[in-house]
Image: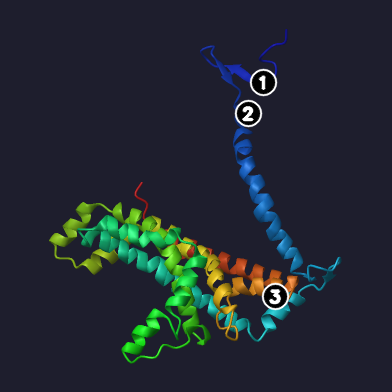
């Protein structure tokens, strides 16, 4: 019969009790992380590396061979006369999404938590309801509402003597409307998350400030926002990442990036180059630039924003 202690699987402690060897549990964390690591490798790391690989080739997804062109795809992107407009549109989308899906939910959450006394459940349900509706359906609803000829908004404007422009063909306005459509969809979820963080602010602190006649806007900026910043930082990142993903749907349904690239951002440029012009290399170069942009935004967030985040525990 073999010695159960010869393999090092167990040892005796000072009291003579059987204990597992120290090194026997070293592999346990890696085994527990293995399933998630494998999934990340298959569905994230490999596609990312393959996209980087394709960005150095000229390929239309139909030819059996790829032509190595080094950095020509990146040069083509940076020398494209529409590249500056695409980057400007992307920055404008991000700013509008942060305004509609980060700043606005904070204000609404504060009002419902500390200002409004009645009907809170009704308001919460009403605000969250669009989150369960398909963005495709929501886009169709907004297209009907904002139809400059026969839409309800146009009818009301005509009754007031106001002319509604064709927003889908108007530079600048088209980005604002597309951002509103996207925000209508994701606003509710962000609101519920922010509401949870704002509601965790101790009511005693707010009441003490009110006893000192501190106005609501100062309570919001100096007390509620700092003390709920751990939730806010999550919603900040979520607003950028989710918003930029979701806004592809109304762009593709309504404007297809037009007029004259007025509504095209980096994400739609990837799709347009890959499946509109079949330029896989150029599309991959746009995708890498988009990844670098998100990485730069995360770097700024961790360097300048994360330091001031308040964690209750």
Say which quadrant the N terminus sits in: top right
Q: Report the residue that reaches farthest toward the top.
A: 1
Q: How many marks?
A: 3
Residue occupied by mark 1: 8
Q: Nearer the viewer, mark 3 or mark 2?
A: 3
User: What's the image's color scheme?
Assistant: rainbow
Disc 1 to disc 2: CB gap under 8 Å: yes
| Residue under the point 53% across and 15% down | 14
Residue occupied by mark 2: 23
| Residue under the point 32% across and 58% down | 124
Q: CA distance from mark 3 to mark 2?
A: 56 Å
**102 to the left or right of 170:** left
Tell me if mark 2 has few (under 14), some (14-19) or many (20+) residues whose alpha carbon lies within 10 angstroms of its own.
Answer: few
In the image, residue 35 sits, relative to residue 140, either above or below, namely above
Residue 204 place in picture, x, y as percent: 20, 52
Disc 3 to disc 1: CB gap under 8 Å: no
Residue occupied by mark 3: 276
**59 to the left or right of 232:** right
């Amino acid at each position: 019969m073999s010695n159960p202690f010869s393999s090092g699987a167990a040892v005796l402690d000072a009291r003579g009790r059987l204990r597992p060897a120290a090194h026997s549990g070293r592999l346990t964390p890696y085994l527990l992380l293995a399933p998630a690591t494998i999934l990340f490798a298959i569905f994230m790391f490999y596609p990312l590396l393959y996209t980087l690989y394709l960005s150095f080739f000229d390929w239309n997804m139909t030819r059996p061979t790829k032509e190595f062109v080094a950095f020509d795809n990146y040069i083509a992107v940076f020398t494209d006369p529409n590249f500056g407009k695409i980057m400007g549109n992307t920055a404008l989308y991000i700013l509008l999404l942060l305004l509609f899906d980060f700043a606005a939910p904070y204000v609404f959450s504060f009002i419902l938590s500390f200002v409004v006394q009645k009907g809170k459940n009704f308001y919460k349900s009403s605000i969250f309801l669009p989150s369960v509706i398909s963005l495709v359906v929501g886009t169709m609803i907004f297209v009907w509402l904002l139809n400059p000829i026969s839409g309800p908004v146009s009818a009301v404007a005509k009754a007031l003597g106001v002319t509604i422009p064709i927003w889908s063909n108007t530079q600048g306005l088209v980005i604002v409307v597309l951002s509103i459509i996207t925000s209508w969809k994701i606003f509710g979820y962000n609101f519920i998350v922010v509401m949870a963080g704002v509601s965790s602010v101790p009511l005693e602190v707010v009441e003490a400030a009110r006893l000192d006649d501190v106005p609501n806007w100062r309570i919001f900026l100096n007390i509620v926002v700092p003390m709920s910043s751990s939730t806010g930082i999550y919603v900040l990142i979520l607003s950028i990442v989710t918003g930029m993903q979701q806004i592809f749907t109304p762009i593709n349904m309504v404007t297809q990036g037009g007029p004259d690239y007025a509504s095209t951002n980096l994400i739609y440029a990837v799709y347009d180059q890959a499946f509109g012009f079949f330029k896989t290399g150029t599309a991959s170069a746009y995708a890498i630039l988009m990844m670098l942009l998100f990485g730069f935004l995360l770097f700024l967030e961790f360097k300048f924003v994360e330091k001031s985040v308040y964690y209750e525990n």
